[in-house]
Image (spheres, rainbow, N blue to C red):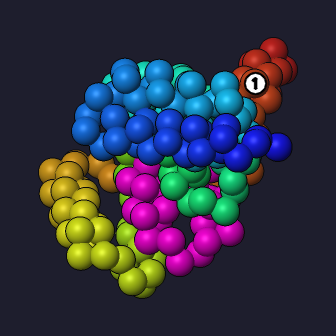
Amino acid sequence: MLCEAALSSLEEKLEHAHAQLAEGYFENAIEAFSECLLLEPGGAKAWQGRALAHFQIKSWNPAISDFRKAKELNPDEPENWVGLGMSLAMVNQIYEAIDVFEELLIKYPHYARGHIQLGELYYRLGVIKKGHQQMDLALASRPSLSERRRIEQLKKEQQTLDEKRFYKPDFEELRLKNKTSPGVAKQLFEFIRNQFRR
């Protein structure tokens, strides 16, 4: 446990680090949050702040690491989950990002921002139906005005893409079909075996 003087010093350092982050001095913010973590390694706010600064400078892997630690220390803060999911998506770990958002939405089913991010990932994967479902759930979750505008923009962009697309596969349906159908190796084996029977 930190003594009162150290606690006061930590609070001042955290305040300074957040000010650096808010003003756009991201490298300075990273250093300031790192100093806070030296004083209190279990400070979820410092891990989150440093993760946000890393995210802003597109330093994805450190952002993933810091958001993961912030989420572990404070799982009740949805922004830690969102930051982790978005950082994973930025390094094309889409399925891992989807897992993070799905877990978040089990915990907070009416968190509009989580539905928006998950819907956007489904759109990126071409799982349009699930993307639309997530956007509808986001609208039903009482989003803010800016979130509502984002939903409308994403749905409109996806509709434009759908209209231009000649072939519209349902990737989720294809995935399920491939899961239940015999494997390619088995099909090839059967084909070769039938050829030698002739």
Which residue ends up furthest to the top in the rendered image?
A: 196
Instruction: Give me the residue at 25% from left, 63% from top.
Output: 150
Packing grade of label 1 (10 A; few <14, some 14-19, many >=20) is few
Q: Is residue 101 found inside the magenta-colored segment of the image?
A: yes
Instruction: Assign the C terminus to one quadrant of the image.
Output: top right
Q: Is residue 139 visible?
A: yes
Question: Quarter of the image holding residue 6?
Answer: top right
Is the residue 114 above or below the residue 112 in the image? above
Residue 171 locus on image (x, y percent): 49, 50
Amino acid type of the residue that numbered disc 1 sits on in the rendered structure: Ala
Along the line of sight, the residue nearer the viewer: 107 or 15 = 15
The residue beneath circle 1 is 185
Residue 58 locus on image (x, y percent): 37, 25
Is 16 displayed left or right of 48 in the figure? Answer: left
Question: Quarter of the image holding residue 19?
Answer: top left
Instruction: Assign the N terminus to one quadrant of the image.
Output: top right
Magenta stretch: dominant SS? helix
Residue 131 locus on image (x, y percent): 42, 61
Q: Which residues are magenta?
A: 98-122
Q: Is residue 75 found inside the magenta-colored segment of the image?
A: no
Instruction: Give me the residue at 68% from left, 30% from top.
Output: 39
Is 46 displayed left or right of 3 in the figure? Answer: left
Along the line of sight, the residue nearer the viewer: 6 or 51 = 6
Q: Is residue 134 visible?
A: no
Residue 106 locus on image (x, y percent): 67, 68
Instruction: Give me the residue at 79% from left, 29% from top.
Output: 186
Is the residue 112 above or below the residue 43 in the image? below
Is the residue 100 above or below the residue 21 in the image? below
Question: Quarter of the image holding residue 158?
Answer: bottom left
Instruction: Give me the residue at 67% from left, 62% from top.
Output: 76
